Amino acid sequence: MRGNNVLGLIFSDIHEERIRELTDKRTMGSVPFGGRYRLIDFPLSNMVNSGINKVGVITKSNYQSLMDHLGSGKAWDLSRKREGLSILPPFTSECTVFNSRIESLASINTFLANSREEFVLLSDSDVVCNIDFTDVVSFHMKHDADITIIYRTGKLPEKICDPTVYTIDKEDRVKDMLINPHTEGVCHYGLSMLLMKRELLMKMIADCVSRNLYNFKRDFLQRNIGTYKICAYEFKGYTQSICSMNAYFEANMALMQSAVRAELFNPDRPIFTKVRDDMPARYGLGSSVSNSLIADGCVIEGSVENCVLFRGVHVGKNTKLENCVVMQDTEIGANCHLNYVIIDKDAVIKNDRSLFGFHSYPVFISKGSVV
Amino acid sequence: MLPRQEVVAMLLAGGQGSRLGVLTKNLAKPAVPYGGKYRIIDFALSNCVNSGIETVGVLTQYQPLVLNEYIGSGQPWDLDSMNAGVRVLPPYQRSRKSDWYKGTANAIYQNIQYIERYNPEYVVVLSGDHIYKMDYSKMLAYHKEKGADCTIAVFEVPLDEASRFGILNTNPDGSIYQFDEKPKVPKSNQASMGIYVFTWSKLRKYLEMDEANPKSSNDFGKDVLPAMLKAGERMFAYRFEGYWKDVGTIDSLWESNMDLLNPNVPLDLNEGDWKIYSRNPVMPPHYIASGAKVQNSLVAEGCNVYGEIDFAVLFAGVTIAPGAVVKDSIIMPGSRVEEGAVVQYAIVSENTVIGKGAVVGARPEDIANKDEWGVTVIGDGCNIAPGAVIPPKAMIDAETLAEEAAK
């Protein structure tokens, strides 16, 4: 059943400096992932699968590829008369692009005010997971919370950017919140997703703006731990934060594990994405493929091992591809040998090329390059 | 009044396709899966859109549910436009003289009202059971250039096979002087493809005359076209070059799927400016495990391949377990081939399980009596028991299988 009184808000731009190579010409939300997806497909599909009918996508810069990807929202079933998808480009009264999350939320005040949903779910687009937000909503209601943050228990992922670490009491209430602390071992760290009443969000944003406070984590959350009832919901499923090129590479490689695929691509909660109408992947004579994830439209004549190939990638004869992530429509010629290489879309690798990276430092070939 | 459309396409999709046996038990022939992610009707629909024809009536009659659901609003083919687009046209009850579609011509006759709403100059009549990529706008240009009343697309077949087809005999200028249905001694090798362009005013007249004739079988090939020729209307043959296959039989369906794996066959579905559109499954990319062997195959999204495939077409969500072997076969969506099973020269329909160690089909080389050999077909939802042996040419359907198991 559709409709659960929750408005979704996705921040498409976050920590882009951490994977500058991939976000040079796009936002975090439109970073290609897993053979046919963009990162925003995960929060967006999670919301849709949880019955959220209305989603606003907040953008800041470089959002052309994002808009191209989202289109009318049809692929997520969000192209509809009532509710549906709204892309919210930067808009401030001072004619400057906002610099903080508080400002961006202040700038969509009208959108928030005109929405009818009681709750708002805010999410970043740099975490890959398959989460059922209906559980979060029930949790929020049961605890009669003002704000529910979603966290995970474990060791902090390496190089994670500005992590928030929470101290949580037995009643699931947040007692303390540390930003970018020095921690070793297991902790409760935030997944940058939170649920709260829409009207409370508008009020708190107005409060911050009136006091000239513009740091979301510090001023919006940390300062208010005593004032509001902030509860914490633990998500126990698979998550992967895309916080560095290594993490990006690892997250793609993790898809070779059938348990990870089963969880992320749960057929009951599918991840939707833009359709391309490619024919199924075609394997030629002499092709040899092992432990790889391969999308529609690929034509493979060489050998591919431990790779993720996006839609429309061509691999020529006698070419050997190992531990690579190759994005859409890249052409790799004959007699090449590539190991630990991440290739952005529309690149051309000519015949007889060799490129080698290392597992802790994959070589990156940028969009449209010719090697 | 709707905006005028120069061309309206009418797609004949009501046939049962009985020669496809269990494959068309629950769905009409145009809805039969093809090529790893398509249904047969995708070709005609995509050709229409790519040729600039935006008004398409799909005539349905036999088992229309799957087809109706598949076509839906027409959005995957961009046929959900405001005034035109695709319409599914089943037979309907009227104040008097209601009937099923009695023949191909009658199906169009019963929908004269639909066509008239667009006040078209031309009507294109298409079959929903052919695999080909064709620019109908070129054929239409030829029709206009010749000042024809009817243009029939023809395909050159080898002369020794011509006696299996409806052959058109033409004058040097391309005008038709004779229809020769399955001639013993063919005079030409131009086979009709079942694709017609009509000047609508003429077609309408002949449809009404045909309807008034109680002896007519209301069929284009048998009645309407010969009547037009007899009356001396301008009829031309339009020669089509490229890949074309009628997939009305198990053998031709199997062959046409295998043609996709042959680089020498001129049917490239990856061509950017003439895409074949379809409803896409929402599934992750397919996974090929270590130890799998994959060659000469077409693999769609959501598949998991652990075993060996060679000359295989795998539709979305198929699983090939470790040690399983699939060769020269087509496995339709959601099916599983369990460990150690061997599938050769077979068409395995949707949501089927081939149990551990089962053997389905055989290579023609391994059969002494060639008459006993043929493509094996496993119907929808069959559960082939572990270790079972299904001989070549067999056609298994889920109900018979369940009845036998109950005995």
Image: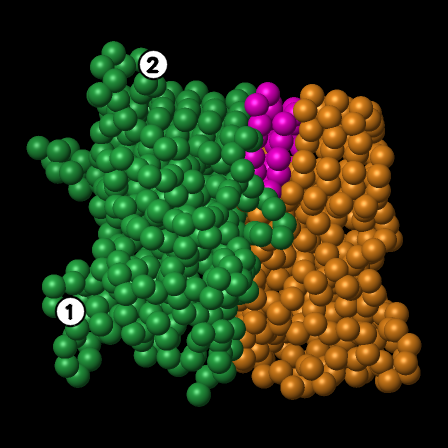
Decide if residue A221 is on the left or right side of residue B4. Answer: right
| Identity of the residue furthest to the front in this view | B172
Q: Quadrant of the N terminus of chain B?
A: bottom left
Q: Callout 2: residue from which chain?
A: B
Chain displayed in green: B
> Vertically, is A52 above or below A203?
above
Give yes or no for residue A295 being in the magenta stretch.
yes
Question: Magenta segment, which residues?
Answer: A281-308
> Vertically, is B139 above or below A366?
below
Give yes or no for residue B250 being in the magenta stretch.
no
Q: Residue B213 has which mark?
A: 1
Residue, x 27% and y 35% (percent of image)?
B185
Decide if residue B119 is on the left or right side of residue B21. Answer: right
Q: How many marks?
A: 2
Q: What element does badge 1 sit on?
A: loop
The crowding category of the residue bearing disc 1, from other C-alpha atoms within 10 Å (few below 14, some 14 to 19, many at least 20), is few
Chain displayed in orange: A
Nearer the observer, B311 or B18: B18
**Amino acid type assigned to the residue bearing label 2 in the image:** Glu
Q: Mark 1, mark 2: which one is toward the viewer?
A: 1
Pointer 2: what residue? B365
Q: What element does badge 2 sit on?
A: helix
**Amino acid type assigned to the residue bearing label 1 in the image:** Asn
Real-space CA distance between mark 1 and mark 2, rounded to the nearest whole angstrom? 53 Å
Residue, x 42% and y 80% (percent of image)?
B119
Nearer the observer, A356 or B35: B35
Of callouts 1 and 2, which one flags the residue occurring earlier in the amino acid sequence?
A: 1
* Residue B292 screen position, x and y as percent: 52, 23
Nearer the observer, A129 or B108: B108
Decide if residue B4 is on the left or right side of residue A315. Answer: left
